[in-house]
Amino acid sequence: MDKPVLDHAQENIPAWHHAGLMDNAHPILDALNRPLRDLRISVTDRCNFRCLYCMPKQVFGKNFRFIHHKDMLSFEEIARLARCFTNLGITKIRLTGGEPLLRRHIERLIAYLADLKRPDGKPLDLTLTTNGSVLAQKAQLLFDAGLKRITISLDAIDNDIFTKINDVGFPVSNILQAIEHAVQMGFSPVKVNAVIRKGINENQILPLVRHFRNTPVILRFIEYMDVGSTPWNREQIVPASQIAETINRHYPIEPLNPNYPGETAERWHYQDGGGELGIISSITKPFCADCTRIRLSTEGRIYPCLFSAEGFDLRELIRSGQSDEQIAQAISRYWQNRSNRYSELRKELGRQPAEHKVEMHYIGG
Ligand code: SAM
Ligand code: SF4
Ligand code: SF4
């Protein structure tokens, strides 16, 4: 790279944008006419939890080889790619992992991304998904760097169940305090994601609802998915309809309109004014037709789908001296060829499509 990009210098609208590679009213479309709108960036493949459905200890044990530091994208490289993506029309960036708050000085990257402007001059919608374990210590730094919204994963209120799920004995009280702290600090919205599995934590649906009702926190339930090569037990899926019924029996809810097309969560609210909640039905009601997300791995490969094994290497382009314009053209071509619709296929076939998949901790949720 010829000059630093983390110095906050803003030159977001390069010549190739004006040359018509994209214009904001006509975003790049994939083979199924889906615009490129969201970028998820995995900033590390490491995590201090060993959630059974994501990084089980038997696979991610002491001998597991995580990505070497020199193979990770640097903040400068991530920032540069984020700028290319922004100029191609993305409107939202989510930082994820692994556990993104384990990447040292993540606030420096956030400061740069928070300052990025879209071609129409508007800021990006910037957010981050975390397990919350070190959030209390880092929240002020993140907020000051420009992160104003956040999602925290929390699958149980009961401490025994929570510690079993994270499998490292991490206490739930720390996460609950971190969530409260984030709300008080002014993060908005604060969202909490809970993956529900039959026989593991379905009895936590109502305790989670009770804990977050009548607070500013938006609780979102997620159907358990077959990500990566972690063994998946279909029998453990709790369908979104069942989650909604369970809640509705105790706290009547009704649907809300989506905030925008392609929103992953179906929005609901409590009829008594207790606030909003969401349910993400990736298995029973797939939303591939509206999927506008691309994923950038820690090593700098882009993936068109959470379930695709084949990525495309952008790090090689950066490190071999390609210009922003050349990188943007490569991304555009890649997106234009995209036809992935794994979750729809899974539903149509009634089984998992026979595809190898990239690991969840490697490209983030
Ligand atoms: N470590 C951070 C965290 O847990 O929030 C960010 C990365 S994590 C891979 C992102 C999200 O993916 C989390 O909300 C997690 O619950 C979700 N997730 C992981 N494995 C999943 C699975 N098998 N099915 C559904 N969601 C899953
Ligand atoms: Fe770590 Fe998040 Fe995966 Fe749990 S879900 S193992 S916290 S990356
Ligand atoms: Fe998007 Fe792939 Fe998920 Fe479908 S399965 S919604 S294409 S990430």
Image (spheres, helix red, strand yellow):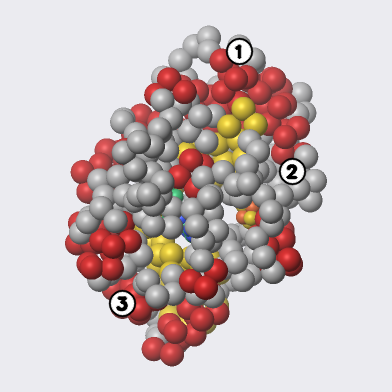
For the point 64% across and 15% down, the residue is 322
Residue 92 falls left or right of residue 26: left
| Residue at image mark 1 | 320
Q: Is residue 104 above or below residue 125?
A: above
Q: Is residue 146 above or below residue 284?
A: above
Mark 1 crowd level (few <14, some 14–19, many ≥20, 10 Å Cα):
few
Residue 306 lies, in percent from the top left, at 59, 49
Q: Is mark 2 on a helix, strand or loop?
A: loop
Mark 2 and mark 1 lie on one chain; the one further toward the N terminus is: 1
For the point 53% across and 24% down, the residue is 80
| Residue at image mark 3 | 207
Amino acid type at mark 3 = Pro
Amino acid type at mark 1 = Ser
Q: Is mark 3 on a helix, strand or loop?
A: helix
Which quadrant of the structure image shows residue 48? top left
The answer for how far apart the CA atoms under marks 2 and 3 are is 41 Å
